[in-house]
Amino acid sequence: MDFIKTVNHVYRDLGQQNINVPALVDELKSWFFLFPQYRFLHPCVIEGKASLVCHAQLSTLSPDAFSALSKITDQYAIFLKEDTRSANKPHASNRRTNAVVVLGFCLGIISTPVLSRESSNANLATPSKVTTQLIEKSNHISVQRRLKNGKQVISLRHVRPPSAEDVLNTYKLKKNLQTVDRQAEHKILSFLKQAYQYQAGDPPAIRTDLQKIASYYAQYPEVVELISELSTKNVQLKYKKGHWQAQALGTQYAVEKVTVLFDTRVGAQLWLQSDCKANPACNITPADALLHEFLHAKLMIVDSEQFIKNGGMKPTLYLFDHEKEVIEQENNLYSQMTKEDGLARPIRHRHNGNLLYASCALCVPGHKEQY
């Protein structure tokens, strides 16, 4: 994962100090899940020692959060320091000739990719209720907080998705009512063809896949609007087998280009449960995965002022604000698409899931043909 590489890069010149960065990052992600309101974490080196700068006055604002974070940094012999910068105090700039910053810390569909060529029982929702049910749910895990011995305890409860059969029945009721906006289809295809940067060895099927994706996108006004916003920006598509990732390139003052690494035969399973195989309620097609990356691109280059203001062009542990906003916009977009075609899509509140091979650009992983 690229954000692990980022931390490795920060701590690489520490000589004898050997830090298990993947394990450290896992610990920090677990900490963030418990204390998301104090999301600022910045790895750095202070006086030759591996350090981690946390939220200003964290020990005062949340002693529990600071104590939990201290246990993690003590375990890895990392110096923990509360941020002392003043909002009125100018930051020292690190200017280099033609300096650029490339963001590649897993701003993609998931945080733990697992590629697989493979892609119900209890009384679940009836077909007429499936669409509403999936739109209302926030994730496949329900977080519950309760008090035990005077202390707050967090417990997780898995939520069952509707069956693939129920989803398909609902989809059939609405699909025939949809139409393709041919003018929008032409514009979307022109954008995709212009953005796609062919490289020797790319699969020949990509061009055909992009045509099918354009026709698919043209059925949804919200998607048409998203592509329209990107069409005048410097957005590039580059094939990379088994990858979904958005990279912003520019300076600390401007985003000049966004490159989306993509694979039109890889989708993702976002709900990780045993009864999720080939179920649209748990999985997304490669075409919908591309929409996720386009949302990253939109926030990076269309809404670049806010992206830069939030530290988007500075190497940090993880862009929590950016990730949160992408997930919110993804949920809104998928929900609108589900309302229009009846095909339930997974709704979530954080990046998680597994990458899976798909038979076609519009196919749900594990299903041989598109719905």
Image: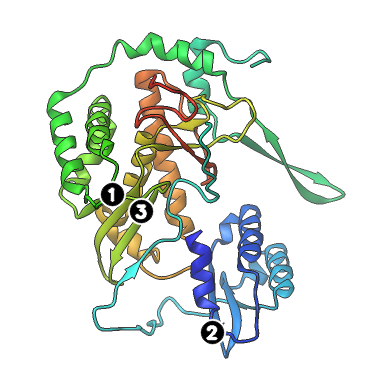
| Residue at 66% across, 63% down | 23
| Lateral position of residue 213 relative to residue 342, left or right | left
Q: Inspect the image, locate mark 1, and give the three-letter code of the amino acid beneath it.
A: Gly
User: Residue 201: which numbered mark, if any?
Assistant: 1
* SS at mark 2 in the image: loop
Q: Which mark is residue 13?
A: 2
Q: Quadrant of the C terminus?
A: top left
Pick whichever of labels 2 and 3 is earlier in the sequence.
Answer: 2
Image location (x, y in percent) of residue 55:
56, 69
* Within-10-Å neighbours for mark 2: few <14, some 14–19, many 20+: few
Position of 344 with respect to 145 (left or right) is left
Q: Secondary structure at mark 3?
A: strand
Instruction: Please name the amino acid that badge 3 sits on.
Output: Ala
Q: Regarding mark 1 in the picture, which secondary structure is present there?
A: loop
Q: Which residue is mark 3?
A: 246
- Give the x, y percent position of residue 300: 31, 56
Real-space Cα separation, disc 3 to disc 1, in angstroms: 21 Å
Say which quarter of the image contains residue 160: top right
